[in-house]
Amino acid sequence: MTRTPNPYPLLDDQRYDAVVNGQYLKSTFSNANAGCLSFTVADGLIGFQDDKLPPAERKARTLIFTQHEMAAFIAGAKNGDFDDLLD
C-alpha cells in the first residue's frame, strides 16, 4: 500500500494516517447514489473526504481539523454566517 504524504507539518504521521484511513460516514441527508462529503473522528481530529473522488485521490485530499476548529465552524453555520453559500 502506498502511503499518502502528510501535508500537515504539526501533525505526526501516525495521527495523520489514523484520520486518512479512518471509518468515514456521511450525512443521512446525502443522496445514496451521489457523492457527498464524508467524515471521520480519529484521535481527537476530524477528517473530511469527498467520496466522489477515487479512493487514492480522496485520501490524498483529506482535510483535517481539530475539534475546536469544527466547533467554531458549526457555531458559525448555526449563526447563519455561511447562508449566502446556498441558493
Image (tube, rainbow, N blue to C red):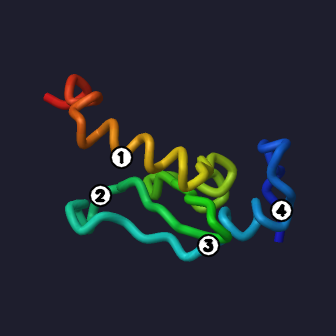
Q: Nearer the viewer, mark 2 or mark 1?
A: 1
Q: Circle 4 sits on which residue? A: 3
Q: Position of residue 72 (x, y in %)?
A: 44, 42
Q: Are marks 3 and 1 in contact (CB under 8 Å)?
A: no
* Residues packed near mark 4 inside 10 Å, few (<14), some (14 to 19) or many (20 plus): few
Q: Earlier in the sequence, mark 2 or mark 3?
A: 3
The amino acid type of the residue labelled 3 equals Gly
Disc 2/disc 1 C-alpha distance (Å): 24 Å
Tell which of 10 and 38 is nearer to you: 10
Task: Give residue 34's mark.
Answer: 2
Q: Are marks 2 and 1 in contact (CB under 8 Å)?
A: no
The amino acid type of the residue labelled 4 equals Arg
Quick check: 72 left or right of 56?
left
Q: Secondary structure at mark 1?
A: helix
Q: Secondary structure at mark 4?
A: loop
Q: Circle 3 sits on which residue? A: 22
Q: Nearer the viewer, mark 3 or mark 1?
A: 1
Disc 4/disc 3 C-alpha distance (Å): 14 Å
Q: Are marks 2 and 3 in contact (CB under 8 Å)?
A: no
Q: Position of residue 18 (x, y in %)?
A: 72, 70
* Residues packed near mark 3 inside 10 Å, few (<14), some (14 to 19) or many (20 plus): some
Tell which of 58 and 9 is nearer to you: 9
Q: Nearer the viewer, mark 2 or mark 3?
A: 3
* Residues packed near mark 2 inside 10 Å, few (<14), some (14 to 19) or many (20 plus): few
